[in-house]
Image: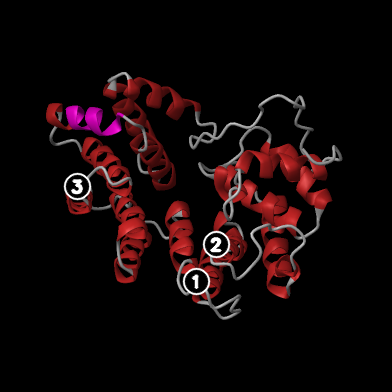
Amino acid sequence: MTPPPPPFRFTRGKDDVAFDPAFGDDELIAARAALAQGRWADVRALLTRTGSDWDLRGHRLVVLGEGKSASVWAHEWQLAEPESPDAAALTAIAAVFRAAAGKQNADSAREACLRAARMSPGDPTPWLGLLILARRTGTDDEQVRAFDQVRGRHRGHHHGHHLMTQCLAERQKTDGDDPFHEVYEFAEWAAGEAGGGSPLTLLPMVALIERYRVLAAAGALPAAPNNLPYWTSSRARTSVRAAFDWWLDWEGGSHPRLSLDLNYLAFGKFHSGDTVAAAALFNRIGSQVTRIPWAYPDRDPKKAFRAARNYALGFGSS
């Protein structure tokens, strides 16, 4: 068993929770700051170094593409280097987020993704953009087609599997906690296909938490997740235990979205009543807090995270 990490030192009363989707990737943070000032050459260098690590490439392009001025500077880059697949990919991802925010036509964002896909046929990232877009504006079939294209290029794509889990959880919003809901079947299949050493081992637990979000938002479960039988069902116990065992045994060191996995796991452990394990996870998370899933179903994520962390670490409620 992996020894517990050293305690995370924080000062109560200080705003020690800051949500940054870069998840502590210092190179990405620097490139994002450079892009905001129009220095797209720094992004080009970053993506060159990233190479074909598809999970890392997808993570970095999504974070860069979400920036307020990303679309403008990506367009400038594409004009300067029209044959660059990296410039095309950033332009596409930026267009996706603009379309999701209602600032751009979804069809033009879709075409940008397809153009980027043609320029780099082996890259799953343009298809990841199409999956993000399909979740916001598309049909069920469009979601499945985009996911299949992502998975066909990288079978263990972390972000792609999480997005598809969210898409499936959002189907059949008001029929209660159906134990045979398709999201559970998908998550168990994907986790089994990936193997025990993969971060996708967490998908059944992610499916449980995403399904809670949907049911709570629809009024089929209470809006406060605390002390619900939902978290102590046989499915919940099995999926949370498997996820925690993965964390204890995992020898992968790190991956680009590990912070998100650990926040899901802390959420699952805390609400299932295992505050000892949750405390170890909060120590490991430190300042790398993610909005998801602490915002579920419609809560202030800072308050929700602090309340859970303080209780697990023995400081009482925040």
Q: Which residues are magenta?
A: 69-77
Q: Is residue 106 above or below residue 192?
A: above
Q: Are marks 1 and 2 in contact (CB under 8 Å)?
A: yes
Query: Residue 307's x, y, as percent?
Result: 74, 42
Query: Residue 23's x, y, as percent?
Result: 53, 36
**Residue on which the image places disc 2:** 217
**Residue on which the image places disc 1:** 173
Residue type at mark 3 is Ala
Between marks 1 and 2, how big is the CA–CA gap?
9 Å
For image coordinates 62% across by 52% down, the residue present is 264
Query: Residue 279's x, y, as percent?
Result: 79, 44
**Residue on which the image places disc 3:** 112
Residue type at mark 1 is Lys
For image coordinates 39% across by 47% down, the residue present is 54
For image coordinates 58% across by 60% down, the residue present is 206
Q: Quadrant of residue 171?
A: bottom left
- Secondary structure at numbered mark 3: helix
